[in-house]
Image (cartoon, rainbow, N blue to C red):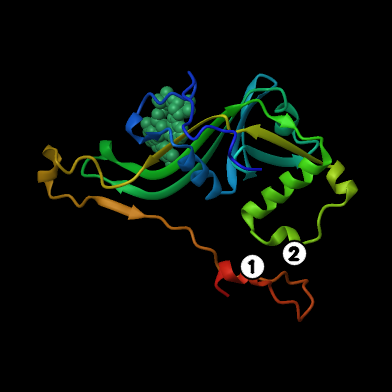
Amino acid sequence: MNNDQLPSVLPETDRTRHRRLREQGSLDRAQLDAVLEAGFVCHLGVVVDGVPMVVPTVYGSDGRHLYFHGSVASRSLVASPGAAVCVTVTHVDGLVLARSVFEHGVNYRSAMVYGVPRLVTDPEEKLAGLRRLTEQATPGQWDYARQPNRKELAATALLALSLEEASVKIRTGAPDDGDGPDAALGIWAGVLPLKPTWGAPEADPLLPAGIAPPPHITARGGA
Ligand SMILES: Cc1cc2nc3c(=O)[nH]c(=O)nc-3n(C[C@H](O)[C@H](O)[C@H](O)COP(=O)(O)OP(=O)(O)OC[C@H]3O[C@@H](n4cnc5c(N)ncnc54)[C@H](O)[C@@H]3O)c2cc1C
């Protein structure tokens, strides 16, 4: 699916209106898409039996929806269709080490999505959503691995959450106290960048000899 039907400026709702640290907020949907495309793990927040539950889970995004999957027995997934959820995606880009502890912080890109997910029942959309989810984590893997059979599909719940009501926030750059009174303290200040990298692929010990990792995996893992 494409992004044509969603406005390029994120609509500010009462929930998504940035209040604190407003300068880090953005209404640019392209920035939201970039944050979502850069990750594959989100935190799904949902109230289950009156108690908030925040579940780390993988997702796929197609510019219009976030897709989540799991067992049909999963409590968070079973509770989600028809119930309001809040989903976050976070990338930590570095530690912001200021002169004062008060000004310490994190450089980051993050997104929050609010909505009521729907259970995907259309077989075509279910396969497309599962494909997106698989490809988001490992591009090229859907066509390489065996795809789900009818029994596996029946055991899997797929939820779709619209990206209509979402917000994005990004912090970059140096600490905020470089031009304040603490600048005279002689304390080192700056940013310690954090860059995730993949390691070399590690073969399953049960793998028969002669099966090499495919290029879409070695290309990422630097084997
Ligand atoms: C890794 C990380 C660490 C952080 N650490 C701290 C910390 O220690 N202390 C601190 O005060 N803040 C921290 N923040 C920022 C924090 O996420 C909030 O943006 C900020 O604290 C404002 O919170 P609030 O409850 O006042 O939200 P409000 O400003 O009331 O939120 C209003 C709306 O703004 C949007 N929004 C708020 N925060 C975000 C976000 N991060 N991403 C996308 N949309 C958002 C949501 O739609 C939300 O409903 C951190 C952020 C990240 C990503």
Q: Earlier in the sequence, mark 1 or mark 2?
A: 2
Any part of residue 21 in sight: no
Provide residue 5's location: percent of width, then percent of height: 60, 34
The residue to which callout 2 is attached is 144
Instruction: Indicate the secondary structure of the residue bearing disc 1.
Output: helix
Q: Quadrant of residue 50?
A: top right
Q: Residue at x 70, y 32 (%)?
A: 76
Provide residue 177's location: percent of width, then percent of height: 20, 40
Residue type beneath disc 1: His
Q: Nearer the viewer, residue 32 or 97?
A: 32
Q: Residue at x 79, y 77 (%)?
A: 208
Relative to 186, 219 lies left or right: right
Residue type beneath disc 2: Tyr
- Is residue 192 shown above or below 172? below
Quadrant including the N terminus: top right
Instruction: Indicate the secondary structure of the residue bearing disc 2.
Output: helix
Tell me the distance, in whole angstroms, between the alpha carbons under discs 1 and 2.
9 Å
Provide residue 135's location: percent of width, then percent of height: 66, 54
Q: Nearer the viewer, residue 11 or 186?
A: 11
Name the outermost residue toward the front. 4
Quadrant including the C terminus: bottom right
Provide residue 142's location: percent of width, then percent of height: 73, 58
Any part of residue 117 in sight: yes
The residue to which callout 1 is attached is 216
Query: Are the residues at dot 1 and dot 2 in contact (C-beta closer than 8 Å)?
Result: yes
